[in-house]
């Protein structure tokens, strides 16, 4: 049952919104009817509204009970008495009502926001989904991945305010990354819908998460087709959609329009005309399935043919289980299709990792104060969730909080941005590990590449004298968190892969600064050992190589048969014995004993680590 909160500026509007709440059925019990939050910012002008913001954050968290884990996306709806869309900037010196609402919208991405009175300019503002009448007129949409573009509107107005601060002749100021394209993730299983939707969100799409037939019909049905309202660049949809509210007569597994034995017309393109090729304007459309056909052996072939005939863009079938967030992007080919931006896979117009801004910029280092305040609050909320989250949905929610914070900071407050980056990757990995529908093993190559690029971009804001060390420390800290997440989930291969990168990074950072030969010898020996530990085949091949090389060297230095030489070298290499036959053999025996003990020790250590894992 949704929990309706009232946020208003006076007692009169509070009473009006209480009447609306009663009409919405929000008076079923004490937990559903928290007291209205009545707050007039004119009586709390301290710190240009920062104090008022903190007060409202605390009151909303308390009323919504978001930290308990009992509330999930779309559970909480905030009824606001009124706003002016044109003034919804998160940057302002005045601390007025619209400014506070803008900051709160960015702080609580999982909350649905509804406005009683919308004054002034509304062109481009998603008023149809955020007016009081929308609560009756259409299905409520999932807010977490910014399906309606409300947070994007606030960011746009914030960027406009940032530009106004730029003086003539100053270099352009970098604003908050913009999401200009939309995606839809359609699946009756909530975890699948949000996992695929989050993948699109992190790569720069505003995402519609569709988990009910009522919402799908509203977005893609016949009435929507008459208005041509869709406008999604990317569609990721499950093949066998079994929505809980879908009528039995509606069949959606087959994409094309077809007739049943009783003569009735059905099919996904029939019931959802905006998904018909004639009206489908998406550039990418992916049908995800386990490949299970049952009695209908022609279903897969028909759907493949339908997607092959897609008029605009391309379509394809992807098979479950997919190996995580990055794997979805690679198997769909979006990494190659969207390779023109700062990071391969980013939606058009979305800039991440953040671009570096030189010292001559208008605002120098540091994010705007109000954005840093919102980002800090987001990170505090994500940190609290980190201690309690144990489901896919909670991990994705935490990842969104971290993503929003890093994008608001844009690297200009680097230490805080790195905290958000660490939480983002940790929540993503935990979501992938907790998600049963993800493959047992998933590749880390792309994640580690992206992590390196993000850290490098953010640490460019540090002084060049400490930039390299800061990047190494940050990456090591994040890798440690990922290793713990993989270990807890029993993902041994992924844990080992991170350990290999971490060892290499730590060895690189611990390279001797002096020319002391003993320290360099120790460093080189440890580096070689860690390089061996990266691969079992590498250990075996190098062990064999050294054994054969010693046999060759001993044979060249003594007049003996191969059998005698191999036997003698075997006692050095595997038994650690020494030879006094001649000076060359004595030296080789010492070398063989040291090399043999070292490689066999590494081999035994590696095998033990595999066997001892739980």
Image: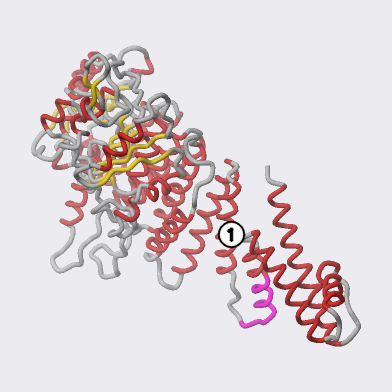
Q: Give the prevailing secondary structure in the magenta stretch.
A: helix
Q: Residue 171: x and y, percent?
A: 20, 67
Query: Quarter of the image holding residue 238?
Result: top left
Q: Specify the quadrant that holds the C terminus.
A: top right
- Neighbour class for label 1 at 10 Å: few (<14), some, many (≥20)? some
Q: Nearer the viewer, residue 322 or 269?
A: 269
**In the rendered image, is residue 155 in sight?**
no
Dividing the picture into quarters, in which one does residue 200 lie? Answer: top left
Q: Is residue 429 left or right of residue 32?
A: right
User: Going by the picture, which residue comes out furthest to the right?
Assistant: 580
Q: Residue at x 38, y 60 (%)?
A: 458
Is 530 on the left-hand or right-hand side of 50? Answer: right
**Up/down of 604 relative to 252, above or below:** below
Foreground residue, 385 or 126?
A: 126
Note whether 131 is above or below 528 in the view shown.
Answer: above
Whether residue 131 is visible here, answered yes or no, is yes
Residue for badge 1: 500
> Which quadrant is home to the N terminus?
top left
Q: Residue at x 84, y 83 (%)?
A: 585
* Residue 11 place in picture, x, y as percent: 21, 22
> Residue 247 location, x and y as percent?
29, 16
Which residues, given as a range, are shown in magenta? 515-525
Residue sitting at x 17%, y 27%: 131
Residue 471: percent from left, percent from top:
46, 63
């Amino acid at each position: 049952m949704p929990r309706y909160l009232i946020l208003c500026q006076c007692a009169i509007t509070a009473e009006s919104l209480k009447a609306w709440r009663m009409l919405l059925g929000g008076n079923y019990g004490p937990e559903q009817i928290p007291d209205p939050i009545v707050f007039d910012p004119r009586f709390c002008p301290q710190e240009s509204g920062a104090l008022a913001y903190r007060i409202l954050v605390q009151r909303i968290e308390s009323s919504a009970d978001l930290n308990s884990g009992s509330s999930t996306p779309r559970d909480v709806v905030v009824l606001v008495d009124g706003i002016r869309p044109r003034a919804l900037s998160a940057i302002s010196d005045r601390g007025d009502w619209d400014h506070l609402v803008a900051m709160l919208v960015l702080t609580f991405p999982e909350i649905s926001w509804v406005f009683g009175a919308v004054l002034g300019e509304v062109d481009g503002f998603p008023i149809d989904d955020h007016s009081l009448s929308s609560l009756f007129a259409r299905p409520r949409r999932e807010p977490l991945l910014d399906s309606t573009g409300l947070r994007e509107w606030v960011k746009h107005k914030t960027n406009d305010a940032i530009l106004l601060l730029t003086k003539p002749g100053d270099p352009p100021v970098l604003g908050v990354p913009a999401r200009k394209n939309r995606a839809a993730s359609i699946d009756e299983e909530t975890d699948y819908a949000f996992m695929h939707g989050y993948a699109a969100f992190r790569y720069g799409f505003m995402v519609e998460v569709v988990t009910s037939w009522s919402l799908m019909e509203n977005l893609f049905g016949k009435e929507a087709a008459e208005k041509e309202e869709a406008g999604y660049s990317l569609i990721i949809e499950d093949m066998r959609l079994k929505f809980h509210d879908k009528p039995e007569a509606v069949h959606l597994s087959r994409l094309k329009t077809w007739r049943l034995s009783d003569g009735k017309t059905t099919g996904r393109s029939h019931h959802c005309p905006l998904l018909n090729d004639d009206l489908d304007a998406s550039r990418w459309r992916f049908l995800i399935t386990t490949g299970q056909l049952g009695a209908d052996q022609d279903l897969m072939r028909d759907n493949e043919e339908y997607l092959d005939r897609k008029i605009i863009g391309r379509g394809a079938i992807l098979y479950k289980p997919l190996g995580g967030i990055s794997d979805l992007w690679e198997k769909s080919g979006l990494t190659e299709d969207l390779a023109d931006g700062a990071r391969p896979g980013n939606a058009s117009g979305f800039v991440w990792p953040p671009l570096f801004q030189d010292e001559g910029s208008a605002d120098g280092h540091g994010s705007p104060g109000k954005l840093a305040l919102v980002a800090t609050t987001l990170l505090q909320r994500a940190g609290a969730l980190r201690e309690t989250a144990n489901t896919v949905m909670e991990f994705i929610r935490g990842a969104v909080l971290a993503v929003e914070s890093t994008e608001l900071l844009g690297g200009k407050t680097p230490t805080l941005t790195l905290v958000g980056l660490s939480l983002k990757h940790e929540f993503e990995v935990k979501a992938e590990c907790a998600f049963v529908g993800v493959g047992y093993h998933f590749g880390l190559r792309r994640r580690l590449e992206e992590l390196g690029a993000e850290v490098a971009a953010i640490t460019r804001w540090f002084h060049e004298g400490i930039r390299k060390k800061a990047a190494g420390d940050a990456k090591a800290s994040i890798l440690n968190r990922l290793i713990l997440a993989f270990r807890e989930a029993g993902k041994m291969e992924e844990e080992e892969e991170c350990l290999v990168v971490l060892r290499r990074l730590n060895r690189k950072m611990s390279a001797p600064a002096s020319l002391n030969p003993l320290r360099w010898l120790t460093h080189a020996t440890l580096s070689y050992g860690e390089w061996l530990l990266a691969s079992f085949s590498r250990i075996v091949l190098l062990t064999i190589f050294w054994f054969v090389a010693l046999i060759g060297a001993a044979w060249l230095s003594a007049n003996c048969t191969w059998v005698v030489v191999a036997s003698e070298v075997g006692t050095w290499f595997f038994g650690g014995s020494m030879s006094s036959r001649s000076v060359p053999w004595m030296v080789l025996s010492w070398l063989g004993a040291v090399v043999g003990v070292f490689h066999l020790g590494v081999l035994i250590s590696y095998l033990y680590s595999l066997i001892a894992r739980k």
